[in-house]
Amino acid sequence: MGGELNNQGLKRAGTGQAGGSKLLRRCWHGLYGIYFVMLLIAIVVLTTIILLVIPGLQRRRRVARFAARAVFRLSATPVLVSGRPLPSDPAIVVANHASYLDGIVMFAVLPVDYCFVIKREMQAVPVASLLLRRLGMEFVERSDSRRAASDTRRLMRAAKGGQHLAAFPEGTFRREPGLGRFHGGAFRAAVTAGLAVIPVTIRGTRAILADGQYLPVPGRIEIEVHEAIAVDRDGGRAEVARLRELAREAILATLGEPDLVAG
């Protein structure tokens, strides 16, 4: 009888300790999240002011890259980069999309030569729209097919002119883990311009700040750069489909999340 009481007491004590640990972790995550958001707001405001007065696109991009790196350094969020080195020649980088942090971390990692392809809805966000325009980003339409075709042609011209491009071919992100369907715009631009496609896998951003989540939590981000995929400029639509499939396969194989398209 006494042994049973002791066991019950130990179980209650263990349950209490576990509950206390969870409470402490939630408090810590809440404080961290508030700090992260305040840090991000401060850096965005300061960067916006600087970008408004600094001349020269490359100079502005260097400032923005420094600011993006500062976000992760000052929030104690490790960003680990592995895989192949990025080529110096113009190319098109495509990555999976899981969080609002993806754009910031890619800007922190990629050279300043890269122009990001952004969904046009971001033009409705005042400060973000101003920042992106000052950084020479390209906006693309997703819902209007006629406007989307026009935007794709503009991307093709930019790629033909030797512009490095970076895109999230899923077009958006969701809360649940998994890799969605890839749109073809970036791959059509690659075929038209004859630029190599470089798949990049982003891991960890969804765990830090998922869709619908207001406060980030501590975590680390991993960026894996895959081997460049050579392009056949004369391949037409079949080549676009091949590039899209190969890039998606490379990312899915190293993402550690389910395929939301299969089946």
Image: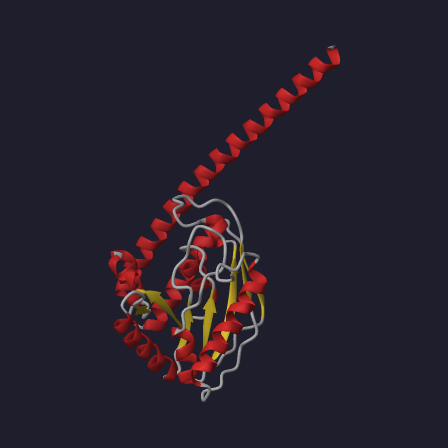
Q: Is residue 139 left or right of residue 201?
A: left
Toward which corner of the image does residue 257 lie, by quadrant? Answer: bottom right
Q: Is residue 17 left or right of residue 196?
A: right
Q: Residue furthest top?
A: 1
Q: Residue furthest front?
A: 263
Question: Which one is nearer the viewer's eye here, 43 or 101?
Answer: 101
Q: Position of residue 134 (x, y in %)?
A: 29, 67
Residue located at (48% from left, 62% from top): 261
**Residue 104 can be seen in this image:** yes
Residue located at (34% from left, 77% from top): 155
- Note whether 114 is above or below 1 in the view shown: below
Residue located at (35% from left, 80% from top): 156
Question: Which one is nearer the viewer's eye here, 62 or 202?
Answer: 202
- Note whether 90 is above or below 45 in the view shown: below
Q: Position of residue 28 (x, y in %)?
A: 49, 36
- Note whether 168 is above or below 192 in the view shown: above
- The number of callouts visible is 0
- Note whether 36 is above or below 88 in the view shown: above
**Residue 75 can be seen in this image:** no
Q: Position of residue 34 (x, y in %)?
A: 40, 41
Residue located at (47% from left, 39% from top): 29
Q: Position of residue 1 (x, y in %)?
A: 74, 10
Q: How is the image coloured?
A: secondary structure
